[in-house]
Image: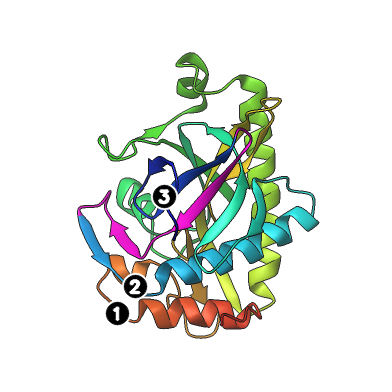
Amino acid sequence: MTKKELIYEGKAKTLFFYDNNKIIQYFKDDATAFNKKKHEIINEKGILNNFISEFIFKYLSENGVENHFIERLNDREQLVKKVDIIPVEVIVRNIATGTLTKRLGIQEGLKLKKPLIEFTLKSDELDDPIISEEHIDVLEYAEKDEINTIKEQALLINKLLLQLFSSINIQLVDFKIEFGRLTIDKKVILADEISPDSCRLWDKSSSEKLDKDRFRKNLGGLIDAYKEVATRLGIKIQ
């Protein structure tokens, strides 16, 4: 990686300046959980997430979901549209697991009658607390019409990803996404990444976890699981 002007460094990605309307997104090998209370470096993770996220963002774009992806530059970098990230993480759940079961005492693995959208404040310091649409509106994280756009896009993304992963015998349990405003016209679009780091993916036949829960729960085999997802999607990494 050549010397570039650093814009922002997150837990799993680093952003570098490209021009006024585009940035370079670099995928690191850092594996983190519980807002970096657990942290390791796992070789190849960033490469796998880069290729998988590229595949998914292209797929979504082809099916009507505008997003920040422009092109993959190399094994670890993408050129993406510059956006101002809305400080709200959007979680879409199809099956009950994780914090939902702990907060509400719901049975692990319960299939929800319809997709559930939850919002959390994007804040590691506060452990990403759950917030409501009212919080987002009143505290001016996003306008009401932007919230509606985000919800509509989240449900469409969920529908498309359910179809994609079902076709390769994977159950999309839940996922986290982020949105941002384009610097040019302030339009709200999908940003960040979609990968096994940000999704829960279970093999439909065995219920084997093929996502970052392998790291969270000390199951081991994270890279093998990510490679399995990439292989099933037909992604070739050289």
Q: Residues within 10 Å of mark 3 (few under 14, many from 20)?
A: some
Whether residue 158 sits left or right of residue 65 in the image: it is left
Q: Do the residues bearing badges 2 and 1 touch, measured as CB atoms within 8 Å?
A: yes
For the residue marked with disc 1, what is the amino acid? Gly
Q: Residue at x 66, y 25 (%)?
A: 186
Where does the C terminus fall, quadrant-wise?
A: bottom right
The percent coordinates of residue 53 (x first, y second) are 57, 62
Q: Nearer the viewer, residue 66 or 218?
A: 66
The answer to whether any part of residue 39 appears in the image is yes
Q: Earlier in the sequence, mark 3 or mark 2?
A: 3
Work out whether 60 lies above or below 190.
below
Task: Give the Cα distance between marks 1 and 3.
Answer: 25 Å
Instruction: Determine which residue is flagged by label 1.
Output: 220
**Which region is colored magenta?**
20-37
Q: Residues within 10 Å of mark 2 (few under 14, many from 20)?
A: some
Work out whether 129 lies above or below 204.
above
Is 29 magenta? The answer is yes
Work out whether 121 lies above or below 223.
above
Q: Do the residues bearing badges 1 and 3 touch, measured as CB atoms within 8 Å?
A: no
Q: Residue at x 25, y 52 (%)?
A: 36
Instruction: Determine which residue is flagged by label 2.
Output: 214
Q: Residue at x 40, y 59 (%)?
A: 97
Q: Earlier in the sequence, mark 2 or mark 1?
A: 2
The percent coordinates of residue 2 (x first, y second) are 45, 57
Instruction: Determine which residue is flagged by label 3.
Output: 14
The image quarter in which residue 108 lies:
bottom left
Secondary element at image label 3: strand
Q: Do the residues bearing badges 3 and 2 touch, measured as CB atoms within 8 Å?
A: no
